[in-house]
Amino acid sequence: MYYILKELKVERQLTCPYCGYLRLYDITSFEKKDKDYFIECYECKKKFKFRKGYKKIYLSRTLSAADVAFKYPVHIYDHYSGLLEIIDPLNWQINVDDDIKHLKECDIFVGLVMGVPTFGTILEMSYAHRNNIPVYFINPTRQWLQDPWVKYHSTRIFDDVDKCYEEIIISAIKELNNM
């Protein structure tokens, strides 16, 4: 999946803050310094900072799935960090108020369940659904794919992590190209 998507051109309309030049930029050809992302203006050749991530993805998972989910996005995220921003609840101490704050900011909720679902993942999924945030449910073990509650609360259901992120990336690229 990564190799196919790497060939796609991801363009985003940006305005250079130095010369005011407005144009589509290939946001996969950026330069990263610390936590900031820079792209070079085609007109004045100065580098300017742009917002990392067009789509904010809240990544929830059961603790048994933590290792798989935590390592997964890295192989596509390096190339698509100008397009996606992963909001990872494991980056802060578990706090329901913080989780809800970050859930409200996300564009897509991705829930990864490898074994038995945890209360946190299920309640976050329900919260996202009630607040009209698209819910992408991933269950590689296929144990919960036919569950009526999962079907009711999910926008899309996957048994493969790569297929889920591939759909998110392609839809984000199409949305950007139609702006």
Image (tube, rainbow, N blue to C red):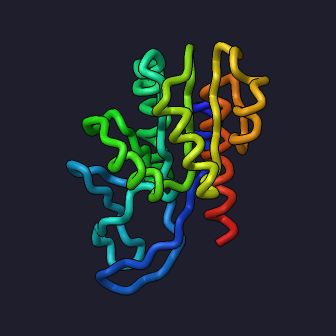
Direction bottom: furthest residue: 20
Is the residue 138 above or below the residue 129 in the image? above
Q: Residue at x 49, y 59 (%)?
A: 54
Left or right of 97, for residue 73: right
Is the residue 22 above or below the residue 67 in the image? below
Q: Residue at x 53, y 66 (%)?
A: 12
Is the residue 151 above or below the residue 56 in the image? above
Q: Quadrant of residue 136?
A: top right
Q: Quadrant of residue 1?
A: top right
Left or right of 134, for residue 12: left
x, y percent for residue 42: 42, 72
Q: Quadrant of the C terminus?
A: bottom right
| Frontmost residue, 28 versus 98 | 98
x, y percent for residue 6: 57, 40
Direction left: furthest residue: 34
Q: Residue at x 64, y 33 (%)?
A: 137
Left or right of 172, for residue 33: left
x, y percent for residue 115: 56, 14
Q: Residue at x 27, y 39 (%)?
A: 92
x, y percent for residue 95: 31, 41
| Frontmost residue, 139 versus 169 | 139
Is the residue 142 above or below the residue 157 in the image? above
Q: How many marks?
A: 0
